[in-house]
Image (tube, coloured by chain):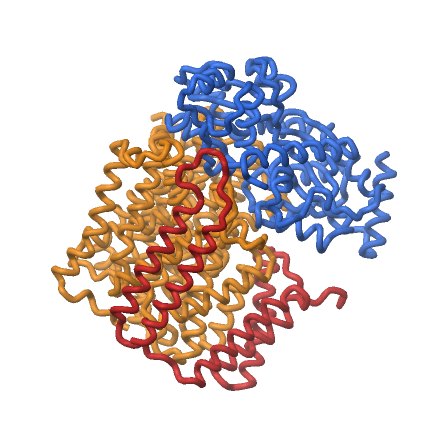
Chain colours: A orange, B red, C blue
């Protein structure tokens, strides 16, 4: 019953007219920020921090506003993924794989409703998980050393071969290109690599620049070339209704995706993108030949959205209990807490229950606000596809430019983005998948760092990589994940036809 | 056929350059058995293998656009690059109006709607970013107002 | 003094923009979430709260190049902007010393002051057999397998702390201890509690919670005196290892502002240091008092840079 008492305390802190208004505003702004390419959840929260100071909000109010923005952005990223094949932010990357094919089939409304509900399920279960398990599950981070992290990243890459390409060499090439790009800059290794004395390259290439280039700018190029022959824009849309049978079918998917996402979120260094990725790939292998993943399977939308929203909630666990930000956005929230003189760490739950439980209550409120806001608004979102391309696409381009420009205020990133745009157009023409490039950029550096740390600690002994049950377990999954697509390919003979 | 072959060959050359560049990375003196070079070498080698496969077993030829379409793509790229360089000196509104107007014209060659799209997007996005999201955008070149 | 300052600020504002309402800007050379962002937001807030500036200080995050982009922006484009302050810390001077900013050097800006420092600290897991810093260095001398995790990259500030400690206790072989750089101090401490490394080196503020919860033992703080609030942690000096390494939190300003403008910022910073708000903020964040402003600070920084250059050459980070 202590839990209920705590929760009551939380709601007494978080529930007032003012905070509810802030939650609604935060959810709304967050959804927009998430949907705009180039503005991710971490930028969104960062942009709004100064506003909380200007408005003179107190600690609770500021937290309510910013966590609503955080959760809102996690919901919002899927909108542009589904409608335009442009991930609004990096966790929404996987949603493009089945969401966009659904939109091209006129089922944009269904995809948005399913992903909205999946986001709700993921975020809600993660909040419950945070509430019940936070103090215990935080210890999971102590079990993950360099060897375990390396195996985890390896697991992610081993399943890449099965992604949306019929040519294994091209998919592998794409992920290697991504990892190669991730080597640029001065990482945890200490030495600057491939920077050629250029300061802009010292921190490496921002994955948002790559995402916006490879997806948004490339989309514009493709459209100019083909005049919209294979685009979702202008496709006759089905009437928006609640797709009950799809929701029923994907219920199990949502639960499994939430579980995987939550665990990925709890591990510092994994984060929401890995959560959505693993949720998608796990579901794909789980369903095997029963799924039509990559061609507009509703479960291919439900899995990554449940996964990334659960991961967003899960990432709060190490942030609050260890002070370790598991993602860019939680790093920003951590900074906010510090500025409010609240220091997260092992003692936070006992020292400041008002903050912790107020935050949890806020998350629950924000989640319901978002569900209530997002499902009815699907009708508005799908109208985006009715905008004439001659207005919509220049708009998307300009939004991308401003989003990326706001990262560093330098034209260097803009030029890089255009470069990625040309590359994205070329790769699409040649049937080279671009999703693995992004994953390579996101995770490649981490994977190398983990391996180098493992080798440093073990004096170069490779058996160190298999020195714990967790590491061995992850290796087994990785090997299975690598072999599964090869096996299915043989069973099905011809992989699913791409219905363009 | 040729597309994949040329691409594979270009990637092999790039990978060799990548490996060559990696040989110049400074190696520190403290303990680090793998060092900063091993991983880049592995990646370069992997790309070479994939490149060879593409050269030897290419997919059916992609459907390449006609020369006119390529020209308009090149033009769109130039417009974007010019836009990137002009944001800082010229502020947000004027370059945005011009660049989005041109892109709009490329997508649908009707001058009046294109001009209106350019103006509308410039003003609309400025309002969205500046006032709704609070980004510090500069509307006009310095010293105009 | 206050009126004089106000008049001065007003004069500067009028001459620059023709209005009296220009806001000072603080550049945090990183994305929100780190020490630099904290410095800007906290100092900016207090400057306004105690009336040192008329307008809330506008905080700009300019991430890139480990602080190098902001540095080059200040040097090349804002060289005489008297309304600009930039957050800095030991990482800034370490990188400048290690030539990580593409050839730019510490003398291209003016370091105006530090008003607090995050004490360097060395901790081990609660169940570790080592209970003092000398236990640890003796183990290294005996050839045991000792490893450190830290929040900065290999060769960075946290790594240099370890090397300084080893040198001061007579261990000259830089290969004697292993170091892995992870993503921040809290991450480093979880690696140590998890038993993957022997010890952790980092800043006090990052691990206050772990010390209070008893999950780690602090072997030493790298300060001149014991840190208020953590009086039971001995300094390295007390244990015969003469190393002082603190991650100071401070500001630099553009090089070409006038000496009056420079001392105006130094005075404002001093006022923040003396304020109760700053004392509370320092306490809440595990910062120790460390106030050096104006010319004193500049010469102290010059000394630190020279020392870092020497050590970095030894470990092969620069030639």
Q: Residue at x 67, y 25 (%)?
A: C289
The one nearer the camera, A473 or B35, is B35
Q: Position of residue A193 (x, y in %)?
A: 50, 50
Q: Position of residue B8 (x, y in %)?
A: 34, 67
Residue A92 is left or right of residue A202, and the answer is left
Which quarter of the rendering shows the C terminus of chain A?
bottom left
Residue C91 is left or right of residue C259, and the answer is left
Instruction: Evaluate whether residue A166 shows in this view.
Output: yes
Q: Image quarter for residue B101?
A: bottom right
Q: Residue at x 46, y 55 (%)?
A: A207
The one nearer the camera, C175 or A411, is C175
Which quarter of the rendering shows the N terminus of chain A?
top left
Q: Residue at x 56, y 85 (%)?
A: B112
The vertical placement of B100 against C215, above or below, is below
The vertical placement of C312 against B13, above or below, is above
Q: Position of residue B85 (x, y in %)?
A: 61, 67
Q: Position of residue C3 (x, y in %)?
A: 86, 38
Instruction: Evaluate whether residue A377 shows in this view.
Output: no
Q: How many marks?
A: 0
The one nearer the camera, B87 or C7, is B87
The vertical placement of C183 against B108, above or below, is above
Find the residue positioned furthest to the left.
Answer: A491
The one nearer the camera, A496 or A366, is A496
Residue B80 is left or right of residue A457, and the answer is right
Q: Image quarter for residue C308?
A: top right
């Amino acid at each position: 019953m202590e839990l209920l008492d705590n929760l009551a305390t939380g709601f007494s802190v978080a529930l007032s007219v003012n905070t509810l208004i802030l939650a609604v505003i935060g959810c709304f702004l967050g959804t927009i920020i998430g949907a705009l390419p180039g503005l991710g959840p971490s930028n969104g929260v960062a942009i709004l921090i100064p506003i909380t100071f200007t408005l003179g909000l107190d600690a609770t109010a500021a937290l309510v506003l910013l966590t609503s923005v955080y959760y809102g952005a996690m919901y919002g990223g899927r909108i542009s993924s589904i409608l335009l094949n442009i991930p609004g932010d990096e966790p929404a990357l996987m949603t493009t794989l089945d969401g966009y094919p659904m939109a091209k089939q006129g089922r944009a409304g269904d995809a948005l409703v399913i992903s909205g509900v999946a986001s709700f399920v993921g975020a809600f279960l993660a909040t419950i998980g945070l509430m019940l398990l936070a103090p215990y599950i935080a210890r999971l981070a102590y079990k993950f050393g360099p060897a375990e992290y390396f195996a985890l990243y390896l697991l992610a890459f081993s399943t890449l071969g099965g992604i949306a390409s019929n040519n294994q060499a091209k998919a592998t090439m794409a992920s290697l290109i991504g990892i190669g790009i991730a080597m640029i800059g001065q990482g945890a290794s200490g030495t600057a690599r491939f920077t050629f004395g250029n300061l802009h390259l010292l921190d490496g290439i921002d994955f948002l620049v790559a995402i916006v280039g490879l997806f948004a700018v490339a989309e514009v190029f493709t459209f100019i070339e083909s005049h919209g022959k294979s685009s979702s824009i202008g496709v006759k849309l089905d009437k928006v209704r609640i797709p009950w049978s799809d929701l029923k079918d994907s219920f199990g998917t949502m639960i499994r995706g939430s579980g995987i996402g939550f665990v990925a979120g709890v591990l510092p260094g994994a984060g929401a993108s890995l959560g959505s990725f693993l949720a998608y790939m796990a579901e794909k292998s789980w369903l095997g030949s029963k799924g039509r993943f990559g061609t507009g399977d509703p479960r291919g939308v439900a899995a990554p959205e449940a996964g990334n929203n659960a991961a967003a909630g899960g990432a709060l666990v190490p942030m609050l209990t260890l002070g370790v930000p598991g993602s860019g956005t939680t790093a920003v929230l951590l900074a906010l807490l510090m500025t409010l003189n609240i220091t997260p760490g092992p003692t936070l739950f006992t020292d400041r229950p008002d903050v912790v439980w107020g935050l949890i209550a806020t998350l629950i409120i924000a989640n319901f606000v978002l569900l209530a806001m997002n499902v009815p608004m699907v009708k508005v979102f799908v109208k985006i596809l009715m905008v004439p391309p001659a207005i919509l696409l220049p708009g998307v381009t300009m939004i991308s430019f401003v989003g990326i420009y706001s990262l560093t205020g330098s034209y260097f990133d803009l030029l890089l983005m255009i470069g990625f745009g040309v590359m994205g157009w070329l790769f699409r023409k040649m049937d080279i998948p671009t999703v693995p490039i992004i994953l390579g950029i996101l995770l490649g550096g981490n994977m190398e760092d983990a391996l180098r740390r493992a080798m440093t600690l073990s004096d170069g002994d490779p058996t160190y990589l298999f020195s714990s049950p967790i590491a061995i377990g992850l290796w087994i999954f990785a090997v299975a994940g690598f072999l599964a697509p090869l096996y299915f390919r043989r069973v099905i003979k011809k992989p699913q036809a791409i219905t363009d | 056929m040729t597309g994949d072959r040329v691409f594979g060959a270009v990637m092999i050359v790039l990978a060799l350059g990548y490996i060559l560049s990696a040989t110049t990375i400074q190696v520190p003196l403290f303990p680090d058995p793998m060092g900063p070079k091993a991983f880049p070498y592995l990646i370069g080698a992997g790309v070479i293998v994939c490149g060879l496969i593409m050269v030897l077993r290419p997919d059916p030829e992609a459907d390449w656009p006609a020369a006119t379409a390529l020209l308009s793509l090149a033009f769109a790229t130039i417009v974007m690059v010019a836009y990137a360089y002009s944001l800082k000196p010229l502020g947000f509104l004027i370059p945005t109006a011009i660049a989005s107007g041109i892109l709009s014209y490329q997508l649908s060659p009707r001058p009046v709607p294109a001009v209106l799209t350019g103006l509308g997007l410039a003003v609309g996005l400025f309002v969205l970013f500046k006032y709704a999201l609070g980004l510090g955008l500069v509307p006009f070149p310095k010293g105009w107002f | 003094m206050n009126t004089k300052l106000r008049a001065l600020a007003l004069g500067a504002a009028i001459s620059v923009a023709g209005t009296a309402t220009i806001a000072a800007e603080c550049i945090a050379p990183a994305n929100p979430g780190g020490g630099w962002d904290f410095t800007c937001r906290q100092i900016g807030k207090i400057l306004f709260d105690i009336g040192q500036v008329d307008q809330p200080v506008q905080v700009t995050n300019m991430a890139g190049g480990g602080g190098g982009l902001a540095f080059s922006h200040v040097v090349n484009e804002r060289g005489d902007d008297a309304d600009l302050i930039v957050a800095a810390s030991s990482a800034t001077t370490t990188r400048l010393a290690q030539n990580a900013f593409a050839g730019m050097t510490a003398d291209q800006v003016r370091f105006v002051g530090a008003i607090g420092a995050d004490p360097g600290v060395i901790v081990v897991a609660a169940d570790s057999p080592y209970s003092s810093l000398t236990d640890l260095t003796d183990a290294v001398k005996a050839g045991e397998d000792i490893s450190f995790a830290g929040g900065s990259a290999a060769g960075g500030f946290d790594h240099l702390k370890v090397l300084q400690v080893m040198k001061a206790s007579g261990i000259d072989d830089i290969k004697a201890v292993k170091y892995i750089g992870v993503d921040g101090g809290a991450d480093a401490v979880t690696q140590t509690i998890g038993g993957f490394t022997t010890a952790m080196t980092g800043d006090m503020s990052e691990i206050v919670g772990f010390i209070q919860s008893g999950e780690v033992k602090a072997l030493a703080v790298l300060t001149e005196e014991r840190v208020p609030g953590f009086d039971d942690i001995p300094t390295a000096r007390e244990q015969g290892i003469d190393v002082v390494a603190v991650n100071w939190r401070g500001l630099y300003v553009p090089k070409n502002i006038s000496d009056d403008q420079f001392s105006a910022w130094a005075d404002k910073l001093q006022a923040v240091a003396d304020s109760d708000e700053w004392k509370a903020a320092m306490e809440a964040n595990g910062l120790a008092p460390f106030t050096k402003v104006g010319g004193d600070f500049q010469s102290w920084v010059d000394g630190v840079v020279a020392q870092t250059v020497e050590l970095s050459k030894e470990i092969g980070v620069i030639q």
